[in-house]
Image (cartoon, rainbow, N blue to C red):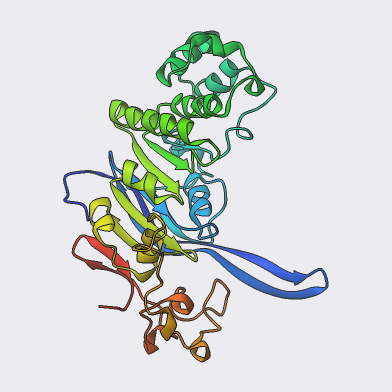
Amino acid sequence: MNTGKKPEVLNINKLSKYYLSYGSLFNFKRNIIKAVDNVSFKVYKGDIFSIVGETGCGKSTLSKLILGLTNRTSGEIFYKGNILNYNLKKLNLRKKIQIVFQDPYSSLNPKKKIYKIVSLPAIKNKIIKKKDALQYSMQMLKNVGLDEDYVFKFPHELSGGQRQRISIARSLSVNPELLVLDEPVSALDVSVSAQILNLLLDLHEKNNLTYVFITHDLRLVRHMADTVCVMYGGKIMEISPVDKFFDGPLHPYSKVLLESILAYGPKNILQFADAGNININNININAGTGKNRRGCVYYNLCSRRMDKCINNEPDLKENGDVQVNCFFP
């Protein structure tokens, strides 16, 4: 999908994260939940790569894997050609990849003043000295549209939008190149969300940042992203340039996801095409997220499913500049 003009920043290669679960306290039978299953994609410098999907599809788990906040089961993560291994401190890559968390209420230390929250990462990474913390924090707050007087406040004295600006300032304090935005406006009201999104776009252009933007709201994707990556059941369903995606996605699940944001009315009520043709006797009981899963993860809900989808899992294949995980031509 890349024309070769932009350098590769992030390369996710067959990345998986599996969890063990038990039926009950006295049930020792283990089940495997495939939260992220054999995921591969690339992110290029200066792009806004958006990962979308419904709750539980694996978006946030994927962000934690990229940041090294949870251990991967298998697969590799490359940053600018170097394999990411957060156990090796000599790589010093953690400051190059930062995250803005979903909830600004719980992601800030309530016991510390704002200037300490913002400056601590820069001090730890030896970007500034401790004596410069106050002045550096004032400058970082100015960059995110906050008055320098906020440096002496505590998080509980700020509104949700102000806290999220502090979170952004903290992430930018170590001069990162890649920013993971894990649903950064989902906990905010509409007017504040618009302000934060515009701030992120301004920072992206000003600092030439690369974003991995995680959301469940396709309307934000249309406003923000260059590339759309659709996830379902831990798998990637489709990767597409944003313009082509909104002109008409290729995967059946992507189409349902896109139709779900249409305005409700007699001409555009959400329709699951050919849903009436689904035969309950043909439901694949092995489709899902478990160890014994076979075939396409979307088989049970797909309007275009075929016999070979039952026991055969499709691969992500290229269709022009779009990649789609489907057997359907």
Q: Which of 4 and 219 is in front in this view?
A: 219
Q: Residue at x 43, y 77 (%)?
A: 296
Find residue 199 and report its horizontal and vertical position in percent: 39, 28
Question: What quarter of the picture does the N terminus occupy?
Answer: bottom left
Q: How many marks?
A: 0
Residue 211 higher or lower than 2, as above or below:
above
Q: Residue at x 40, y 34 (%)?
A: 197
Q: Is residue 155 left or right of residue 50?
A: right
Residue 98 higher or lower than 44, as above or below:
above
Kindly indicate the quadrant of the structure image that contains residue 277: bottom left
Kindly indicate the quadrant of the structure image that contains residue 320: bottom left
Q: Which residue is drawn at 43% across and 15% down?
A: 142
Q: List the single residue furthest toward the front.
A: 266
Find residue 85 and report its horizontal and vertical position in percent: 48, 47
Find residue 326 and report its horizontal and vertical position in percent: 33, 74
Q: In this view, does 246 lie to the left or right of 107?
A: left
Question: What quarter of the picture does the C terminus occupy?
Answer: bottom left
Q: Which residue is drawn at 37% across and 31% down?
A: 198
Residue 290 higher or lower than 66, as above or below:
below
Kindly indicate the quadrant of the structure image that contains residue 272: bottom left
Query: Is residue 297 visible from the viewing direction of this image?
Result: yes
Q: In this view, does 297 lie to the left or right of 45?
A: right
Find residue 183 and report its horizontal and vertical position in percent: 49, 43
